[in-house]
C-alpha cells in the first residue's frame, strides 16, 4: 500500500499547528526514518497514517483507502493492515509472551490452529520462541520490544509504524531492534520509524524525512540524521 499525503495540515484546538502543508509519498516496501526535534510533529504524522488523527486540511490515501472518507467498517479492515510499535512496549504484564502475541489474532477471530502456528512463527522470527512462557516483566527491555514487534507483525501488516521504538533501549538493544525492522522490511513490509537515534540513522542508511515545526524540512533517499549541524 502506497502512502500519500497531499497538503496535509493538522491544527489542534485551539491553535497548535502540528503539521503544515505536508506532501509526502511513501511507496510500498520502503524504509523511512522520520526525524526532527521533540514537538516537531512526528507522532502526529504517524497518527494520521493510522487515522487516529484526522487532518484539518488536505488528503491522505493509503493503498486504495482515502482516509478522509473511510467508513467505519473499512477502517477496521484498514487497521489490520498496519502494525504499530511504541517507545514503551505496551505489553500486557499478566499475559505470557506467547499470549501477548496470540491475542492479536484471537481478537480478529483467527482459528486456534492458525493462531498457534503463526504466533510460533513470529516468535521464532524475533528470536524469542524460547521465552514464550515468560511474562514481560521477566524480560529485558530489548526482549520486551521484540515481543512488541512480534505482536505488531503477527497479522502480516503491509505497513509497520514504529514511534521511537528504541527510545528506552541501550545502543546494543537498539541495534537489535533496528536490524529486526530492516529484516521485516526486506520481506516487503513498509517500515516508518520515528527516531532520535542519530547513530542508527547514520549507520544503517535509509530514506530520511526530517520534520521541522510541522513541515517537511528534508527528504533524502539515503539520508543522515543531520545536515549542516541541523536536524
Ligand atoms: N492531541 C493533541 N492535542 C493538542 N496538541 C497536540 C496533540 N498531539 C500533539 N500536539 C501538539 O502538536 C505538536 C506536535 O506534537 P507531536 O506530533 O507529538 O511531535 P513529536 O512526535 O515530533 O514530538 C506539539 O506542539 C504537541 O504539543
Ligand atoms: Mg513523538
Image (cartoon, rainbow, N blue to C red):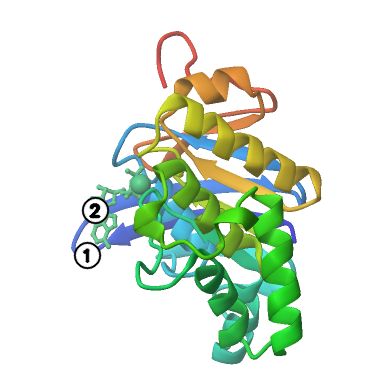
In this view, 160 is above or below 35: below
Label 1 C-beta lies within 8 Å of the nearest ligand 1 atom = yes
Residue ranking furthest to the left: 14
Label 2 crowd bin: few (<14), some (14–19), many (20+), radius 10 Å = few
167 relative position to 45: left or right:
left
167, 223: nearer the viewer: 167
156 relative position to 161: left or right:
right
Q: How many labels, in total?
A: 2
Q: Quadrant of the N terminus?
A: bottom right
Label 2 C-beta lies within 8 Å of the nearest ligand 1 atom = yes
111 relative position to 228: left or right:
right
- Could you tell me residue 208's position as x and y percent? 59, 30
- Could you tell me residue 86's position as x and y percent? 43, 53
Which residue position holds label 2?
16
Give SS at disc 1. loop
Residue 206 falls in which quadrant of the image? top right
37, 128: nearer the viewer: 128
Q: Quadrant of the C terminus?
A: top left
Point 52% across, 74% down: residue:
99
39, 141: nearer the viewer: 141
Residue 40 falls in which quadrant of the image? top left
Q: Is residue 145 visible?
A: yes
Q: Is residue 70 visible?
A: no
24, 103: nearer the viewer: 103
Numbered label attached to residue 183: none
Which residue position holds label 1?
13
Residue ranking furthest to the right: 187
- Could you tell me residue 154's position as x and y percent? 66, 66
58 relative position to 110: left or right:
left
- Could you tell me residue 61's position as x and y percent? 65, 65
Point 62% across, 79% down: residue:
105
Point 40% across, 35% down: residue:
169
Amino acid at each position: 500500500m502506497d502512502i500519500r499525503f497531499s497538503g496535509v495540515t493538522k491544527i489542534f484546538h485551539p491553535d497548535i499547528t502540528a503539521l503544515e502543508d505536508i506532501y509526502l509519498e511513501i511507496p510500498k516496501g520502503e524504509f523511512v526514518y522520520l526525524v526532527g526535534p521533540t514537538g516537531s510533529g512526528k507522532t502526529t504524522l504517524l497518527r494520521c497514517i493510522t487515522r487516529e488523527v484526522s487532518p484539518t486540511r488536505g488528503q491522505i490515501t493509503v493503498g486504495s483507502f482515502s482516509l478522509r472518507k473511510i467508513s467505519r467498517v473499512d477502517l477496521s479492515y484498514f487497521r489490520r493492515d498496519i502494525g504499530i510499535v511504541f517507545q514503551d512496549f505496551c505489553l500486557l504484564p499478566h499475559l505470557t509472551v506467547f499470549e501477548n502475541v496470540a491475542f492479536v489474532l484471537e481478537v480478529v477471530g483467527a482459528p486456534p490452529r492458525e493462531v498457534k502456528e503463526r504466533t510460533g512463527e513470529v516468535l521464532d522470527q524475533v528470536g524469542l520462541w524460547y521465552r514464550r512462557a515468560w511474562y514481560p516483566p521477566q524480560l529485558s527491555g530489548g526482549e520486551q520490544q521484540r515481543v512488541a514487534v512480534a505482536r505488531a507483525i503477527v497479522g502480516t501488516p503491509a505497513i509497520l509504524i514504529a514511534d521511537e521504538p528504541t527510545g528506552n533501549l541501550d545502543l546494543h538493544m537498539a541495534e537489535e531492534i533496528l536490524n529486526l525492522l530492516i529484516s521485516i522490511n526486506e520481506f516487503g513490509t513498509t517500515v516508518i520509524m520515528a527516531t532520535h537515534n542519530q547513530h542508527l540513522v547514520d549507520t544503517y542508511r535509509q530514506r530520511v524525512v526530517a520534520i521541522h515545526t510541522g513541515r517537511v524540512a528534508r527528504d533524502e533517499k539515503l539520508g543522515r540524521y543531520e545536515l549542516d549541524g541541523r536536524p
